[in-house]
Image (cartoon, rainbow, N blue to C red):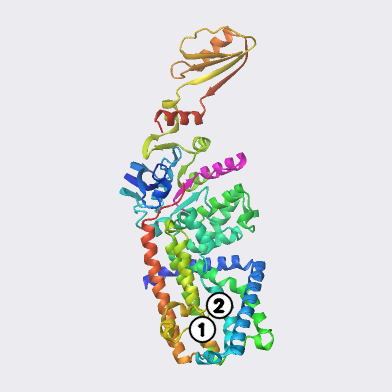
Amino acid sequence: MQIELKEICKNYKVSQRPEGRFGMLKGAFVRNTKTIKALDNITFNIRQGELVGYIGPNGAGKSTTVKIMSGILTPDSGSCTIMNRIPYKERKSHVSEIGVVFGQRSQLWWDVPVNDSFDLLKDIYDIPTIRYKKRFDELIEALSISDLLKTPVRQLSLGQRMRCEIASALLHSPKILFLDEPTIGLDAVSKLALRDFLKNENHKNGVTMILTTHDMDDIESLCSRVMVIGHGNLLYDGNLDMLKQQYAPLCNIKASLDKKTEKFHIEGTEDIKVVGNTWNVLYDPSKIPTHSIVEILTKKLPLKDIVIEQQDIDEIIAQMYKEMSL
Amino acid sequence: MKKLQSSIPIIRGCFSIFKIKTAEGFQYRMAGLAGASTSIFWGLIEITVYTIFFKYANNREAGLQAGMTLRQIVSYVWLSQLFFLMQPMNIDKDILRKITSGDVAVELCRPLDLYFHWFAKTAASRLTPMFWRGSIILIFAMIMPLSYRLLPPESLTGFFFMILSIFSAFLLCTAYAMFICTVRLNVALGEGPAYILMLIGGILSGAYLPLQLWPDVMQKFLLYQPFAGYLDIPLRLYIGTMSTDSGLFAISLQLCWTVVFIAAGKVLMSFRLKNLIIQGG
């Protein structure tokens, strides 16, 4: 196992202003602190080359976990071993083998050309020149940033900057890459390009990637494994299809009709909703095959058009959060 | 030996940071020009005030007793305007942003010692104002009318010692700036303590009033306290109010204080990092 976390706990103290009319005054002298359990007994293992999506609502403990794994934070209890090292104890040797991308924080130098930042990283990571050159060319090509190298970072657009950030995180050929909301604020084209690149990198170089994001499409297109965290607890760990089946077993057939037709029951379906000239037939594909419903509908209804929909992944997750009362 | 070898990449990394940061600071020509005009204006006012004191006041002897002539003071004023730029008067804006926004996290994801990483950055930001602002002040000071002009050094050896001493002053300023940075790492403390610490350094450096003009009883203390090393010691060597023998001692004093501040900063930082709270997401 490349990454092993065992019973990790982490608490934060948050100071709160006392309540009441004079709370503000009182707060200057007395402070109430509240302990928040950011992580509560988190245990999981990740193999080399896995692409894991790590999701959960805001404030669930995602970033805290990533920070512990990248050696920035020390957990209160529990053990974390990554590539046979304890990240927060051997920070320097640990971080030289991982890459981190924070979507909302820039690690490039704001006022100097991108190229200078890269040169700096070469020295910081002490990358041999030949290896650096090869890797540099590879990344420049794959992310198509050769035109941006001379531009100061502050003049780049968000998408351009993000591509440079990714390149900077991968220059030293890390074995593990942590991505904290890498696609935040990107347009569709940049998003797709970025996903392609990440997939490729994972495939070609076997880089383990852990991706925290709120964009479910990222997860759907990239990750074979999903971990869901909420209130500091690991709630789900497995593949995405299982998650879907568990929380959204139903499919929907949307049938537009030529004229309004009275509702009748179809054997095997869960529910039918009629809105104006449209029928929504909800059914479980594991109980009744889609084509047999379509057959019945085409026979009995004046069909104009028919669409088969899976439940939207965002809705599934929202529903899941709700069910788990997050 | 092994330890030495492993420290070479660290030094190279730090030097690289220093280089890139210096290049960054070099861009700001207009800021340099604006700053220089402030410094020159301030320097002229100071010289005028000193001239009035020396020419018209009854306590003309006071200056003589302090062992400084008006000409020496004029040189002192110009050079202190120049080397004042090295003093930590604010925390490097880049580092400050990282502390307050929580981007320290990103810095910690690099295989570098954070202290020396920031030390290199701070050193560069101590040096960069000297390029534009500093050279404009210097040129201006040298082409002033005679009674307002910066004089050449008292002796060649004195000048040589001053150069040495300026270099140690540069390290000292950086070490103290870093010490303040590590204090600032505790975000809950806010700006206050950092500014108080910087102001103490500024006042005791002699930038506002040459240390030799302070009361006699304080002279011994003033020379031994760390901030004399900011600019008073090098300037004394330049204008010749300090012999080269005591100059050597004074330079080693500067270096001693530098080591003290580096040690204090490192200890404080490692303590802080253990209890680090990272702001935001």
Q: Chain of mark 2?
A: B
Give the position of the N terminus of chain A as an image quadrant: top left
Quadrant of res B5: bottom left
Query: With respect to residue B19, does A249 lie above or below?
Result: above
| Amino acid at pointer 2 | Phe
- Quick one: B46 or B35, which is closer to the camera? B46
Labelled disc at residue B234: 1
Query: With respect to residue A262, does B131 lie above or below?
Result: below
Q: Is residue A175 covered in magenta?
A: yes
Q: Chain of mark 1?
A: B
Q: Provide the residue span drawn in magenta.
A: A174-199
Marks 1,2: beta carbons within 8 A: yes
Dot 1, crowdedness within 10 Å: few (<14), some or many (≥20)?
many
Dot 2, crowdedness within 10 Å: few (<14), some or many (≥20)?
many
Query: With respect to residue B271, does B35 lie above or below?
Result: below
Of callouts 1 and 2, the N-terminal one: 2
| Rendering coords of residue A81 (x, y %) | 34, 50
Give the position of the C terminus of chain A as an image quadrant: top left
Badge 1 marks a residue whose secondary structure is: helix
**Residue assigned mark 2:** B83
Q: Specify whether disc 1 shares its chain with disc 2.
A: yes
| Rendering coords of residue A148 (x, y %) | 64, 54
Q: Residue at x 54, y 61 (%)?
A: B93
Q: Residue at x 52, y 73 (%)?
A: B87
